[in-house]
Image (cartoon, coloured by chain):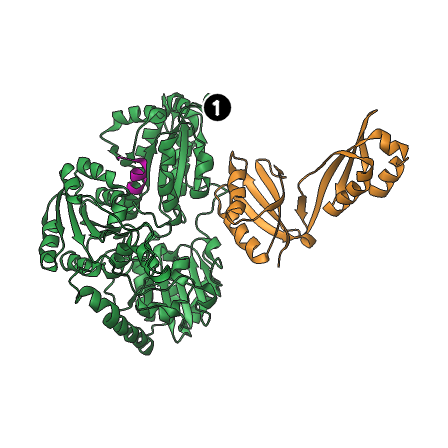
Amino acid sequence: MEAVLTKPVTKTISTTGADAVLKSLIAEDAALVFGYPGGAIMPIYDALYNYQQEVSHVLTRHEQGAVHAAQGYARATGEVGVVFATSGPGATNLITGIADAMIDSTPLVCITGQVASHLLGSDAFQEIDIISISMPVTKWNVQVTKAEDLPKAIAKAFYIAKSGRPGPVLIDITKDAQFGAVDFCYEKCEGFRSYKPVPRLELTQVKKAAEMINNAQRPFVLFGQGVLLAGAEKEFKTFIEKTGIPAAWTLLGLSALPTAHPLNVGMLGMHGNYAPNILTNECDVLIAIGMRFDDRVTGDLAQYAKQAKVIHLDIDPSEINKNVAVDVPVLGDCRESLEQLTTQVHMNSHPIWLERFQELAAIENEQVIAPELAPASADLKMGEVINQINQITEGNAILVTDVGQHQMVACRYTQFNQSKTNITSGGLGTMGFCLPAALGAKLGAPDKEVIAVIGDGGFQMCIQELGTIFQTRAAVKIVILNNSFLGMVRQWQELFFDKRYSSTELENPDFIKIAEGYSIKGKSITERADLAEAVKEMLDHEGSYLLEVHVGKEDNVFPMVPTGSSVADIRLS
Amino acid sequence: MKQLFTISIFTENSIGLLNRVTSMFTRRHLNIESLNTSESETPGIHRYTIVINTTLSAVKKLTLQIEKQVEVIRACYHEDSETVFQEIALYKVSTKSVSEENLVEKLIRDNHARILSFQEDYMFIEKTGHKAETQELLEFLKPYGVLEFVRSGRVSVIKPTEAITE
């Protein structure tokens, strides 16, 4: 009998650790890296020079910009974002972005240089224990001190970052490992014993969930980013359409279902829509899909959906019963879970129940939405700016937002037709996220219009990335909603701290002149009469563009569930 | 209601993983009562035994969070009644004071202790048992002068016959 080879023989190539890093990235189809060089990562940057055709590198102006750009890239493409940074301050500057990616389940592979292994623990120049520092904010991290260990570590890193519930990983590579010799041979990781990314779907649980849904009178679906991460948009839509169940989104679930869909009843939580918040406490079966009952969604847990039976579909077992007691957990990848569930639920509709949503939506429309979109005030409102953008983009642009009032308004009023088109810092609430994330999104999805809507505070937190936008010629459209305040903090000061505006007013520079310094075209407007034309000019412009809109200084975002209140106590003013 | 739980964690033997696991406690403001790590019956798989005083709800969530960590193979928690557990204590006492009182025999017999080493100046006693038992011997010896005392973390095995490492 002839010998049968079960595996193709992989040729090994003698090379350096740094070269092996680049070869490994190419093997993982990582064609774009965001980073910033420095002493301890120089061998990798030197190797990068040989692979300029295969791997593009975007030199940001700060490591925080690099990691947020990689997040934007990952969120727009669904691929792993890759970051390079040097040791010490280079590595610590990544931490905010890594923490942001961790809490928002964004796949990243961060590669940091480290001092040579004989110097570890000696307080060498730019030495920092980034493994310990990044431990609580990474899905996995590892320090590599030998070149021969690099291919395996990188293969594992990519596998961990993108499988199961995605997240950031960090590989810290000592300088001697980068210079060291390795017989390079790359095998993609396909699993290992101490990591189970996707729990096995139990069909008995699916059956229980289906029965509960079939018997429900007032069922209500809450959907989160899990739908997007699983690529389950189609299965999700089929499920709600078959069962006729109204569905509301978390901040990160936004764009998984078109906003104009008749069963899309809006946003959950603190600044979400009126109907889904009130009716959370009136539904009889709550079906949570790929969401984690964040406190901004639930308000006071003791008064949250106590009347409802809860079904929770999630890939992460530790999310079940973490915040809300669950009657029927359905563990697994939600694409598979939804597919199975849809086969077992009855075709149904809930016209009377849907009418309740419409009644409450009409109240919100009259008291909040209409005055926001067609205001009587002389000052421009944030909502009307977003609405003007909608008129032209028709829900087909990628919206990237920062954190604060503009974020809530933009997410509330932007129309979405396509999935993975809402990119924002949800869990961590990182100001400064938007500008670099928009750059990363544009580089990941060059054919899409990318609009960065940002406050005047957050804009100045990563303003240096205008330099990267300039150098890459990425056609990012930047809209600053300028109220000369840290608006959300000011709103809380107004409502809960007797209008004591402690350190929230900003005296801002001439943003248009700053943009001009980077050859970015810009315009500043204050008048309603100029809005439509200014938005059109921005979107018609071929390159990047900065539109500054002066909005009402002391406008508030409503509705609002005050911290510690029940979702049913949502305020309209 | 708070009570003692023993958390057993089976892991890969990798640098820094203990740090990752204990940070799960730190983040939740949970204090560790005792901690022991050693290789398990399966080569390459390490076993952490961590004792914690907390509520059932907190230990359930904590254990799931620990099990979620990459390189943790399994994590489970048990009440004291579900496990067999021991701690070891070492006592260093002055030979003179103990032998003057002619206590040695009583000490060994009554406490199921043993003498590990006997020097002219000091003797070293070992006792294995639950914390209350090793504590009792400590209290007994205190009047004669305990020069050093150390108690190990709990080691524990689970009573039911479930195969914990497959």
Please, is residue A93 above or below residue B76 in the view? Answer: above
In percent of width and height, residue A472 lies at 19, 36
**Residue B17 visible, this orientation:** yes
Asked if the magenta segment contains residue A63, the reply would be yes
What chain is tagged by disc 1? A
Q: Is residue B136 left or right of residue A572?
A: right
Q: Residues within 10 Å of mark 1 (few under 14, many from 20)?
A: few
> What residue sits 28% from the left and 47% below the top?
A458
Chain B, which colour?
A: orange
Q: Is residue A507 left or right of residue A294?
A: left
In percent of width and height, residue A96 lies at 37, 42
Q: Quadrant of residue A570?
A: bottom left
Q: Give A565 or A392, whichever is nearer the viewer.
A: A565
The magenta stretch spans which residues? Answer: A61-69
> What residue sits 45% from the left and 60% below the top?
A330
Please name the amino acid that badge 1 sits on: Ser
The quarter of the rendered structure image containing the C terminus of chain A is: bottom left
**Residue A345 visible, this orientation:** no
Q: Give A513 or B70, whichever is nearer the viewer.
A: A513
Q: Quadrant of residue A84?
A: top left
Q: Give A500 or A300, whichever is nearer the viewer.
A: A500
In percent of width and height, residue A415 lies at 22, 60
Asked if the magenta segment contains residue B53, the reply would be no
Residue at mark 1: A122
Q: Secondary structure at mark 1?
A: loop
The quarter of the rendered structure image containing the N terminus of chain A is: top left
In percent of width and height, residue B55 lies at 59, 56
> What residue sits 45% from the left and 72% below the top?
A307
The chain in green: A
Please, is residue A22 above or below residue A422 in the view? Answer: above
